[in-house]
Image (cartoon, rainbow, N blue to C red):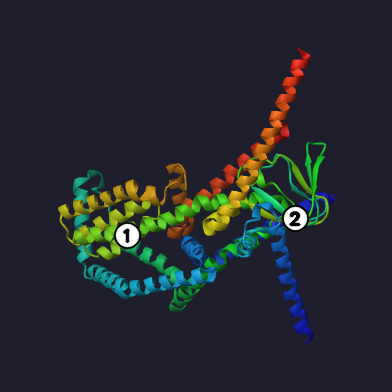
Amino acid sequence: MKEDSLWTNIFRKQSAEKTDTLKVLKNIPLFRDLSRKELRQLERILHQRTYKQNEVIFNEGQPGVGMYIIDSGEVRITIGPEQKVLAVLTKGDFFGEMALLLEAPRTASAIASKPSKLYGFFQPDLFSILKTFPRTGNKILLRLSQMIAERLRHSNLENQELRKKLASLTKREQ
Amino acid sequence: MDVTVNRFLKILLALLFFAALIWLTVKLSNIITIFIIGALLAYILDPITSFLEYKGMTRMQATSVVFLFLALFLFLFSYFVVPLIVDQVKVIQHTFSSGQGTESLKRMEQSLKESIPMLKNVNLDISARLHKAINHLSNSVFSLVGSLISLITTLVVIPFVVFFLLKDGRNIIKGMVSIIPNRHFEIALNLLYKTDQQIGGYLRGQFFDAAIIGFLSVIALWILHVPYFLLIGTFAGLANMVPFVGPLTGAIVAILVVFLSNGTANQMIMVAVAFGIIQLLDNVLVQPLVVAGSVQMHPLIVLFAVIIGGQFGGILGMFLAVPAAAVLKVLIVEMYQMYQSFNLTSQS
């Protein structure tokens, strides 16, 4: 009887963990359009990693190949040798998604400020999902393009603002 | 002092570990060979399984379907083609034991001595050498199989390995990646992906290329009435998997067989031309379509890799030499690029 309850506990724990993971994934903007079945396909591909407090996830300048999703814990994004903190991310947040499309050096460092559990989603995984489950892959790719387009639009607006400010400053100086 | 002793102990332990690893590899070489063959087959069949998975099957269903088709193909092959090959082998054995082949070889030796003055005083003894070569070849082929028990083990174990690697290969790789320390994990994953891209296409391409070349060779030799056409054609196809050495060996064996079976010079030329045309078709049509864009290496490196592979692992070694060299190339190029980018960032 005791064994039964042990097994039930284990399975209950596992299925609860799975539902929790699916919830975390569903809240990531990149995977928002995916159905439950597609999220499960994705979950099978993701890499689960555990980090100790103050452990480096990646360093600025290091070649990057993918993004990380925080399942639990806290991650600090820093820049420069003085380690200026740009953001502090918690459960459900994600970072490094640009590296999914562009294999370029990381623009900032990521450090686990608390013991953290992260999911890694990398360029090879994206290509693999595009090959095996193209419908799921295309949904992710479309969302990624939309997010990047949105960021580009935002940057353009900022750029315009700055140009205007610069123009008015030069006029004032003249 | 303590640090030096510690270091010495560490080096000693590492050396002992490597020695044990080499000893184990040598001792278990037969099992390792079986595993490599199984892994290769699973790797070649993986895209078909993934395609079925994409069509809506689960991985288990897709693997089972691939296995059913493979079993059907093997059954048909062993029912229709194997008896024909066995018959042809028996004829070859008869030719040699009856002395017919030896006579032809003596004739060849005589004509060689007459046409090349340098060889006049040299004892060529082609017949004995060929006998030795055939014996050596059959020994090396059968050493893998050994006895009947190990033959059955091989026939049972390989499908098992293929089935489970095909079904769980992805999870096994994921499991192995998960034990890599966080620091090296991303780099390792990237290297794994790049290596797969380089050698996956090559191995699958070579396999299908060999099947096409084998089929074309059998048809060509059958049209030209070459004896043992099925055996030589199959051999030519398999040999084609080894770059440079393979295609030439297939053609030489075919011409030699025509010569030994008292074929005319015309027939020998026709066989050579047929192999030439097949190679041309292979290089112009098949290779660019099937193998293209996978392993990009200088022909000289490929040639050296094949020779070294042959030295270490025989025929299987020669076949695996190119993908092994490709893995090494990916590792070196990626490490170099990483070193450079790290250098750049540390300078800036």
Please indicate, yes or no, whether residue A123 appears anywhere in the rendered image: no
Q: Is residue B288 left or right of residue B84?
A: right
Split into 4 quadrants, where in the image is the C terminus of chain B? Answer: top right
The three-letter code of the residue at mark 1 reads Gly
Mark 1 falls within which chain? B
The x and y percentages for residue B315 are 42, 59
Q: Is residue B337 left or right of residue B153?
A: right
Please indicate, yes or no, whether residue B230 appears anywhere in the rendered image: yes
Distance between the Cα atoms at labels 2 and 1?
56 Å
The three-letter code of the residue at mark 2 reads Gly
| Same chain? Circles 2 and 1 | no
Q: Secondary structure at mark 1?
A: helix
Mark 2 falls within which chain? A
What mark, if any, has residue A92 been given in the picture? Answer: 2
- Residue B243 lies, with reference to residue A161, above or below; the image says below
Q: Which residue does the image show at 48% across and 72% down from the upper left?
A: B64
Image quadrant assignment for residue A83: top right
Q: Which residue does the image show at 78% across and 87% down from the upper left?
A: A1
- Residue B51 lies, with reference to residue B186, above or below; the image says below
For marks 2 and 1, give the one nearer the viewer: 2
- Residue A3 lies, with reference to residue A44, above or below; the image says below
Label 2, residues with CA under 10 Å away: few <14, some 14-19, many ≥20? some
Q: Are marks 2 and 1 in contact (CB under 8 Å)?
A: no
The x and y percentages for residue A118 are 73, 56
Q: Which residue does the image show at 58% across and 44% down from the upper left?
A: B332
User: Which of the two residues, B279 or B341, is positioned nearer the viewer here?
Assistant: B341
- Farthest bottom residue in view: A1
The x and y percentages for residue A126 are 59, 53
Q: Is residue B323 left or right of residue B193?
A: left
Q: Which residue is mark 1?
A: B214
User: Which of the two residues, B265 or B224, is positioned nearer the viewer here?
Assistant: B224
Q: Secondary structure at mark 2?
A: loop
